[in-house]
Image (cartoon, rainbow, N blue to C red):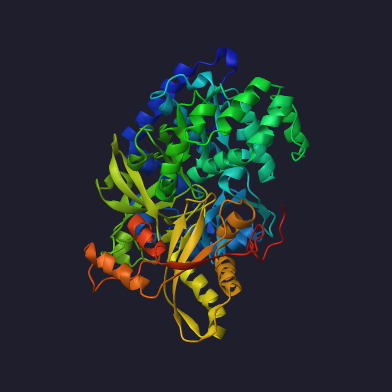
Amino acid sequence: MPEAPKITQKATDYNLELKNKKTLQLIEDMTSNADEVQKNVLQEILSSNAHVEYLKTHGLNGRTDRESFKNIMPVITYEDIQPSVERIANGDTSPIICSKPISEFLTSSGTSGGERKLMPTIEEELGRRSLLYSLLMPVMSQFVPGLDKGKGMYFLFIKSEAETPGGLVARPVLTSYYKSSHFKNRPYDPYTNYTSPNETILCPNSYQSMYSQMLCGLCQHKEVLRVGAVFASGFIRAIKFLEKHWRLLCNDIRTGTIDSQITDQSVREAVMNILKPDPKLANFIKAECSKDSWQGIITRLWPNTKYVDVIVTGTMSQYIPTLDYYSNGLPLVCTMYASSECYFGVNLNPLCRPSEVSYTLIPTMAYFEFLPVQRNNGVSNSISMPKTLNEKEQQELVDLVDVKLGREYELVVTTYSGLYRYRVGDVLRVAGFKNKAPQFNFICRKNVVLSIDSDKTDEVELQHAVKNAVNHLLPFDATLAEYTSFADTTTIPGHYVLYWELSLNGNTPIPPSVFEDCCLTIEESLNSVYRQGRVCDKSIGPLEIKIVEPGTFDKLMDYAISLGASINQYKTPRCVKFAPIVELLNSRVVSCYFSPKCPKWFPGHKQWSNTN
């Protein structure tokens, strides 16, 4: 993820070495005194919010010490604070959860009741996020020197936003940041020198934004030292876009003009400041893109690239082979760990292998607690956390400096903007320590079974969607005997695949259109983040149902038992990732069907009036 600027001097008196040294010392100081910093953070949060309704209702009565906080305040999920969030969204400006005014809502990729969760934020949080961003490049410069001598080619995009009935904006955290003065009016900093002008990033049309950013990146190809996007999936989409549109782009570079499909005037003007007729560059790009193989295309077109900066932890790890192919094995760098709820930490060893990425939580960001996680034994070795905690489980939470090496925990945060002992839903494993601050591997998002981009579909939601779809089979006296799912990222964009084994009792053949209706019904039943990915962002492809031969799921059980699963404990996995199992399922497919059109989606929550 690209770094945010800090307010700095002019280019003429900018001392990069001194700035980097001070930043690295700040990391040393914060991690060496992690527990003291955390104690102060909690005290600051509780004292500034002592009189808010939420804390008074629970009887904290102005106390700011850790012991009272842990004994009195419950550990919560989004559903517990949703009534408060809805009051704020509907225009209640009283201090319900925070003494400072809620400036906007950040829409989470997690959902509740099929709609994006709304995370409250306050104006000063932009400064805290900027602080975390400002740590990234000084850390990176220790491993890759000279990054200030060139540019970063990052594909960054804004997403649609909505307005709550009370007049607050609701939008993703990165859209909020890119539209803020922190990003748009950033002062000189050699590390925030991007190939994409602000106007191309802030263009609301995704095609025009991608086209213009790619065009600018190609025009400045020799200056590019690092490339990236937020998620691995987004960067691969950019490469696929180039694969599809390089002829148009070459024509623009050859003639020094912009394709007529780019109609945003501010984008055209910004690009024309960079674009000049360059037949030699156009011929070079044409020669490379015309070759049979696109292996190493990144290093071929941008030869000075040192690394690819994308998130490849968690479900994004499925894109690593594709990134390796396009980049000729360049280092894949995950720089930071953040969410809509809070920005958490940084990777202090950015050139490590993706499987070894660990994030050091920065103790000034929020107050952190950790709920020990127990894995379910059995074939899936899955993680399933209880929705509500009993008194004993509430007492098991430990502080930042008290986590144990090798143990897994669910992250719980208390933020400056009104979340108190909030379960984020991320499962982390302690990988080591930086001074007194633990370093965590990101293991997974709790209960998520399917994910292609920023979407997160859990088992309960998938089951509900499938249940809705199988109603289409009833007129044909057919039922669903078994099913599982797979996130197929061999296609770009990736798409959900469901394997269905049917029990056919009737003699009437089921027409293909019925299975297509099943596909669409499933998509209509999934959450708004998935549907936005299908409709607006085009980051997810049409859902596919593959009908498999009778007896396929018996074969699947036999295979699992042959690997050591207990026949007594075996349950059909609702999602599969293990390549041999996917191969087994694919070998028994008798027919395939795709969703015939996009599901319905619009910005905001169903009950709001929307603004684009």
Picture layout, residue 512 above or below residue 198: below
Answer whether residue 59 is visible to the viewer in this image. Answer: no
Locate residue 265 relative to residue 314 in the image: left or right.
right
Picture layout, residue 57 above or below residue 28: below
Splitting the image into 4 quarters, where does residue 394 fall? Answer: bottom left
Residue that lies at the very extreme toward the front in this rendered image: 292
In percent of width and height, residue 307 lies at: 45, 30
In percent of width and height, residue 424 lies at: 43, 54
The residue depicted at 78 percent of the width and 36 percent of the height is 265
Residue that lies at the very extreme toward the top in this rendered image: 12
In percent of width and height, residue 447 lies at: 40, 61
Splitting the image into 4 quarters, where does residue 212 fall? Answer: top right
- Tell which of 513 and 25 is nearer to you: 513
Locate residue 545 relative to residue 162 in the image: left or right.
left
Locate residue 100 relative to residue 55 in the image: left or right.
right
In percent of width and height, residue 448 lies at: 43, 59
Tally the marks: 0
Answer whether residue 395 is visible to the viewer in this image. Answer: yes
The residue depicted at 52 percent of the width and 60 percent of the height is 111
- Tell which of 363 and 358 is nearer to you: 358
- Tell which of 213 and 170 is nearer to you: 213
